[in-house]
Structures are given as structure tokens and as C-alpha cells.
Image (spheres, helix red, strand yellow):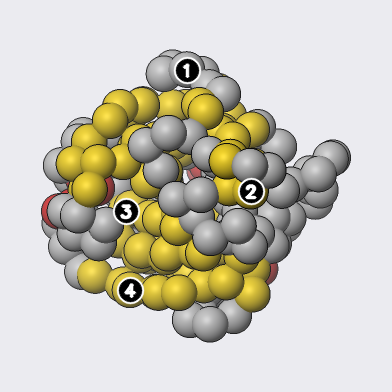
Amino acid sequence: MHHEGTHTLILCGIIFVLVNVICYLLFKFSLPFYILLAITSVVYIILVNFFRCPIRFFNGDTEGLVIAPADGTIVVLEEIQENEYFHEKRIMVSIFMSLLNVHANWFPVDGIIRMVKHEDGNFHKAWLPKASLENERSTVIIETPQGDNVLVRQVAGAMARRIVSYAHENDECYIDEHLGFIKFGSRVDLYLPLNSEICVKQGQKTIGDTTIIAKLPVRNGKSTD
């Protein structure tokens, strides 16, 4: 279980128990009691599922690879003009996380963290294109050992109200390490060099720290940006 969910699960557990005890005292073992018990049980199971944090390790050499930073579904896979940081064309890959997905996020590449920036914003539905630039978001730029620059962005959704990032500028980061956590429906965007080899398709399901998203460009045995 992810530590970001500890307080939420304890608080909700206490509230649900108290509500059910009160309902039992009022109605005993009658239909209203069983209905409330069923509703609170289902909600709590969903919360437990949401905050689970599976232990994963990528199996294989990570050099030149971009690994999925999140569980979810690829909702955007296209070439765009990125004018906020790179000021050039990039391949954008967006992974949407539903309430049923694990919401822990992983670093997609090994490297040095060159920039971390959190920005407040709106709370549009996470799968909308404008969410990437208008919603609350946390942006991290990572320079890989081969010199590529990869942007990974945690984006809040219509329900998400808290983005947690563990990234710090000038720190080393590695695949298998947690980038952060987003509480309730959200997405994670990747902006990759234009000549990266994309290994996924739009609509494909991803598994964080497991699915290979792309292979970074290689020239003379070394990746280039």
C-alpha cells in the first residue's frame, strides 16, 4: 500500500465504521443497514485498490529505453510543437489513469533531473488535450546518460486535487524509482525526441515500470537528442 494513502484510508475507515455502527443502532439488521454496509464496503475497497503500490523492477537493460511512468491507457500519441520548454517538435505520449488504476508514478528513464516545476491550474477532464497545459501539473525534465532530454509531466484531472512529486533538481533518477503520486483520476505525459522509436499504440494499456514506451534515437552507438 502506498504511504500517500495511509491517512485517507485510516480516516475513511474510522468514518465508515462509525456510520455503520450508528445505522445499526437505529435500524438493527434491517434493509437500510445492509444497503449502507454494502455501499461503504465497496467504496473502501475502491480506495484500497486505488492506493495499492505494487513492487516492480524492470527486467532488462534500461539504456536508451523509455519505460511507462504509469498504469493506464494511451490516449494521445502524436507529433506536436512543444513551445514551453524545448521550442521544437516532439512526440507526445499521454497515459490516462482511471480510478481503477494504480496511481503511483515511476521515472521513465535513467538520468539527471535538470528541472522540476509545479504549476497551479484548472481541473479539466484529464483525457482532454488542453489538460496538459491548463490543468494543475508538475513538470520534470530528465537528461539521460546519452544526452537526451525527456520531459515527463504529471497532470491533475477533474477529480484530482493533489499531485505529489519526489523529483529534485540535480538529483540522479532511475527507472524502478517512484517519480510521485497523483490522487484520483489523472494522466502522465511524455515529450520525446522526434526520432525516437515508438513501441506502443494509441489505446494500448500500459503497466508502469514495465511497458516499453519508446527507444531513444541512436547514432554511432550513442543516443542523441
Which is more foreground, mark 4 or mark 2?
2
> Mark 3: which secondary structure?
strand
Q: Which mark is residue 156?
A: 3
Which is more foreground, mark 3 or mark 4?
4
C-alpha separation, residue under disc 1 versus residue under disc 4:
29 Å
Residue contact at pointers 3 and 1, CB within 8 angstroms: no
Q: Residues within 10 Å of mark 3 (few under 14, many from 20)?
A: many
> Mark 2: which secondary structure?
strand
C-alpha separation, residue under disc 3 versus residue under disc 2:
35 Å
User: Looking at the image, is 99 positioned above or below residue 161?
Assistant: above
Q: Amino acid at mark 2?
A: Lys
What residue do we see at 49% from left, 64% from top? 142
What residue is shown with label 2? 222
Which quarter of the image is occupied by the N terminus? bottom right
Question: Which label's residue is closer to the chain start, 2 or 1?
Answer: 1
- Location of residue 90 in the rendering, given as x and y in whole percent from the top left corner: 31, 41
Q: Residues within 10 Å of mark 4 (few under 14, many from 20)?
A: some
User: Looking at the image, is 172 positioned above or below residue 123?
Assistant: below
- Location of residue 36 in the rendering, given as x and y in whole percent from the top left corner: 50, 39
Q: Amino acid at mark 3?
A: Ala
Q: Residues within 10 Å of mark 2 (few under 14, many from 20)?
A: some
Q: Is residue 101 visible?
A: no
Question: Which label's residue is closer to the chain start, 4 or 2?
Answer: 4
Which is more foreground, mark 3 or mark 2?
2
Q: Residues within 10 Å of mark 1 (few under 14, many from 20)?
A: some
C-alpha separation, residue under disc 3 versus residue under disc 1:
23 Å
What residue is shown with label 1? 201
What residue is shown with label 4? 117
What residue do we see at 68% from left, 43% from top? 221
C-alpha separation, residue under disc 4 versus residue under disc 2:
29 Å
Question: Which label's residue is closer to the chain start, 3 or 1?
Answer: 3
Q: Nearer the viewer, residue 72 or 142?
A: 142
